[in-house]
Image (cartoon, rainbow, N blue to C red):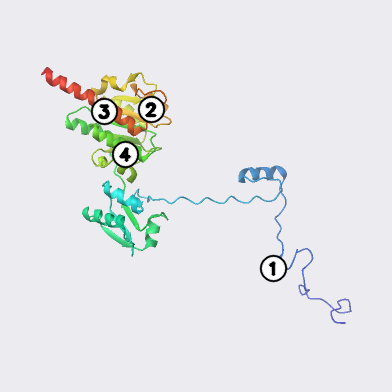
Amino acid sequence: MPGNSRRQGARRIPGSKKGATRGTGGAKPKALRGRGPTPRAEERGKTAKRTGSAPATGRAARPARPSRPAPRRRTADGAETVAGRNAVVEALRAGVPATALLVAERIDADDRVKEALRLAADGRLPLLEAPRAELDRVTAGAVHQGLVLQVPPYRYAHPDDLPARAEGAGVAPLLIALDGVTDPRNLGAVVRSAAAFGAHGVVVPERRSAGMTAGAWKASAGAAARVPVARATNLARQLEAYRSGGLVVVGLSAAGTVDAADLEVSVDPVVLVLGSEDAGLSRLVERTCDLLVRIPMTTGTESLNAGVAAGIVLYEIARHRAHAELSADLSD
């Protein structure tokens, strides 16, 4: 009888039997695959703790889905791009230094685009027409709306060169150091106040600090072109070097014992140190200060941001210096 494998001399070719093979869980293309030996309970707990899933079912934990990195607008050489029609127009109005304005092909020109093109032409800024795919690549996927401004990396001064600028002008040096200020807009506001009250430079640490980005440049309202910003590898060590050079290190703190209006050392070479609004001065930086000053405030106001605080104290220093200069002229 056909198909009778029991008759004498009959032999089935391996693998020719129709249907699922015993123990496969289905046809071979859809066969189940084993997960391997079940790990011990304590090992399953460790795995669940690492991955953040519960080990109640004993199943292998799914790996966490990697988060998508945020679009970066800074290249390896420190250059920066300003993307978006409003942002580009504001940067051009503020005089942010740029190397080129990239415009998408067949862009729908509205008032912002027309103003950006006019400002770029007035500033003799190169205009480059590029496909939108190229703008996407340059901005790392940021929303650019067909306009991208390329900003070169800021050239920081050396901290040791800042007092020399004041000595060349024949006045006592007045510097500002920022400790832990991470908002570029605050940095720009400090630079603007420094220019308004005759400071000769701003010092920021290399780490955990805001840098002179396009946002900081806009907040400075063009003052960044007149006041140099320097970067210090170690801020506390740099302040010690300033002290050795004859400068008085004055820290702004709520625990200060001297009011800003009564700061008699204002006529001396001074380094004014400001911390962040939340944490204030760090312990190491505060220890390097010769004295701490405070801004008297009404009850209920705990702190001011660095930009506002810098403007208040710099005004008091400028007032003391102007009074001392007037007294010296009258005595002569």
Q: Position of residue 100 (x, y in %)?
A: 28, 55
Q: Residue sitting at 84 percent across and 79 percent down?
A: 3
Query: Could you tell whether 86 is left or right of 317 in the image?
Result: right
Q: Amino acid at mark 3?
A: Tyr
First in residue order: circle 2 vs circle 4: 4
Residue 97 in view, yes or no: no
Query: Could you tell whether 30 is left or right of 102 in the image?
Result: right
Q: Amino acid at mark 4?
A: Gly
Give the secondary structure at mark 1: helix
Residue for badge 2: 285
Q: Residue sitting at 24 percent across and 35 percent down?
A: 195
Residue for badge 3: 315
First in residue order: circle 4 vs circle 3: 4
Q: Whole-Å distance between the Cαs marked 3 and 1?
A: 81 Å
Give the secondary structure at mark 2: helix
Question: Answer yes or no: do the residues labelled 3 and 1 have beta carbons within 8 Å?
Answer: no
Q: Whole-Å distance between the Cαs marked 1 and 2?
A: 69 Å
Q: Amino acid at mark 1?
A: Pro
Residue for badge 4: 188
